[in-house]
Amino acid sequence: MHKGNPAKLPISVCILVKNEDENLKHSLPPLSIFEEILVYDSGSTDKSLEICESHGANVVHGEWLGFPKSRKKLFLQATQPWLFWLDADEVVSSSLSKALQEINFDNLNCNGFEINRKVFFENQWVNHGEWFPDWNLRIFRSDCWEIEDRAVHESINLKGTSQKLNGLLKHHSYRDWNDRNLRIEKYSELWVQMKSKEGVKTFLGEGTLRAIWRFFRNYIIKFGFLDGILGFKLAISIAKEVNLKYKKLYQLNSH
């Protein structure tokens, strides 16, 4: 019979998984400080399940319902008083682990915690631009949340207040530029469908104008240039992504 370790944090870490074995090798080991690791697997064919089970994760099997519905289904399976939304490509840093272990969860006057994510891409940390700082509400009481049903960029609506935590969530979001470009293509389609359903209209050239502004904001205002060549490439990439989304939305609205 499994006996819970009283030193573990009263948190259910919740991760959506499909063929994430490379990421899980890094994201699962630091999670031993939590009482529960909960995984929603939507049909992995690699070694994801093996790795999850070797780290004591409880695996829930189910079909892919889209991000918000799949996440909600997983959150509702959790047994702990606090939930931790973690993506498979995110790693809890030692500084974040330390900050969490210093919290007295029995005596708190907030209902959630925001965590700062930092992206590692092209063998370097992204320290400026739109990608950092990147505060996200990721830990919250299990009875104080709602999730918005959005095709992309879903988020938690918290009942009550949140605090910012020290320490970083290390984000290994893209394997390479090809991976990023494929995902831009995929997410732009989801974004366009979502905006079209919301009745959002656009005009010819809006994508170009928004892209120019986003490049300027990212590279100049948010100091993206301090990240060197990568900072420049990212500012271009983000501008192209914006242009693509609005171009697709315009084309859809024009039909």
Image (cartoon, rainbow, N blue to C red):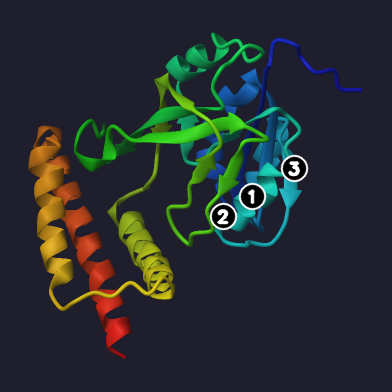
Q: Position of residue 136 (x, y in %)?
A: 42, 36
Q: Residues within 10 Å of mark 2 (few under 14, many from 20)?
A: some
N-terminal of the pair, mark 3 or mark 2, is: 2
CA distance separating discs 1 and 3: 9 Å
Element type where label 3 sits in the image: loop
Closer to us: 164 or 38 = 164
Q: Identify the residue under disc 2.
A: 68
Residue pictured at 85% horizontal, 18% vertical: 3
Q: Secondary structure at mark 2?
A: helix
Kind of element beneath mark 1:
helix
Give residue 254's position: percent from left, percent from top. 27, 87
Q: Is residue 87 visible from the viewing direction of this image? A: no
Indicate whether 26 appears above or below 121: above
- What crowding class fits label 1: few (fewer than 14 Cα within 10 Å), some (14-19), or many (20 or more)? some
Q: Are marks 3 and 2 in contact (CB under 8 Å)?
A: no
Q: Looking at the picture, which amino acid does disc 3 mark?
A: Gln
Look at the picture and state if 43 lies above or below 87: below
Q: Which residue in the rendered view is the most extreme toward the bottom? A: 255
Residue at the image point whose x is 19% and y is 62% from the top: 240
Q: Position of residue 46 (x, y in %)?
A: 62, 52
Label 3 sits on residue: 77
Q: CB atoms at circles 2 and 1 under 8 Å apart?
A: yes
Three-letter amino acid code at disc 1?
Lys
The residue that disc 1 covers is: 72
Q: Amino acid at mark 2?
A: Pro
Looking at the picture, does residue 126 appear above or below residue 252? above
